[in-house]
Image (cartoon, rainbow, N blue to C red):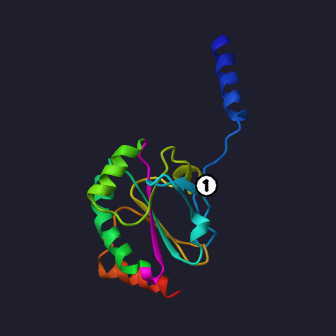
Amino acid sequence: MRCTLVFLLFLLSLLTLSVTPCLAVKLNTPAPDFTLKDLQGGRQTLSGYKGKLVLLNFWSTTCPPCVQELPSLNDLYKEQKQAGLLVLGIALDPAEKPVRELAGKLRLEFPVVLDSNKDVYFDSYGLFGQPVSVIIDRTGLVREKIIGAVDWNSPQSRAKIHSYLKGR
């Protein structure tokens, strides 16, 4: 009887806990704004890029598909930045040093910011898995979430980005 009572009290306490659900960002809704520290010690704010096509790429140095994807993402950025594309690499590593080393080794030209506590990744965007890319159009609306590595040099990826740059 005593064990049953303890168990029921335990269940009751679980039911009364206040839990804030983690909601995944939805397509065709405004992208949640954020400010994160970059590798140069500055701050990058998403809302500062309104008017550009923004490709957020969430990754970590310990994720082989993430690392494999970065060179083609860098190529895409170099070729399309003049057309209005901004790639923002969001590193999920707990420490800055491995991110800095990998970004230097790969000669990444796009800005890389640190989301070490995964506040933007989990809390603002409700994402899981790596890599994950989020495409935000020039008006600030989320247009796509892409889970998994992408060959950003493929004709399909290039056509998709070109279409977004043209406002379609």
> What residue lies at 38% left-to-right and 84% top-to-bottom?
159
Res 34 quadrant in image = bottom right
Residue type indicated by callout 1: Leu
Residue 126 can be seen, yes or no: no
* Within-10-Å neighbours for mark 1: few <14, some 14–19, many 20+: few
Residue 131 position in % (x across, y down): 39, 58
> What residue lies at 55% left-to-right and 53% top-to-bottom?
120
> What residue lies at 29% left-to-right and 66% top-to-bottom?
71
Res 112 quadrant in image = bottom left
18 and 79: which one is in front?
A: 79
From the viewer's perspective, is 14 left or right of 52?
right
Q: Quadrant of the N terminus?
A: top right
Q: Which residues are magenta?
A: 82-94
134 and 48: which one is in front?
A: 48
> What residue lies at 42% left-to-right and 77% top-to-bottom?
81
- Whether residue 166 is situated above or below residue 86 in the rendered picture: below
Residue 40 position in % (x across, y down): 45, 55
- Whether residue 79 is situated above or below residue 145 in the rendered picture: below
165 and 45: which one is in front?
A: 45
Residue receiving disc 1? 23
Res 7 quadrant in image = top right
* Callout 1 secondary element: loop
- Whether residue 88 is situated above or below residue 64 in the rendered picture: below
- How many numbered circles are shown? 1
From the viewer's perspective, is 73 left or right of 143?
left
User: Is 131 colored magenta in this rendering?
Assistant: no
Residue 140 position in % (x across, y down): 60, 73
Residue 167 position in % (x across, y down): 53, 86
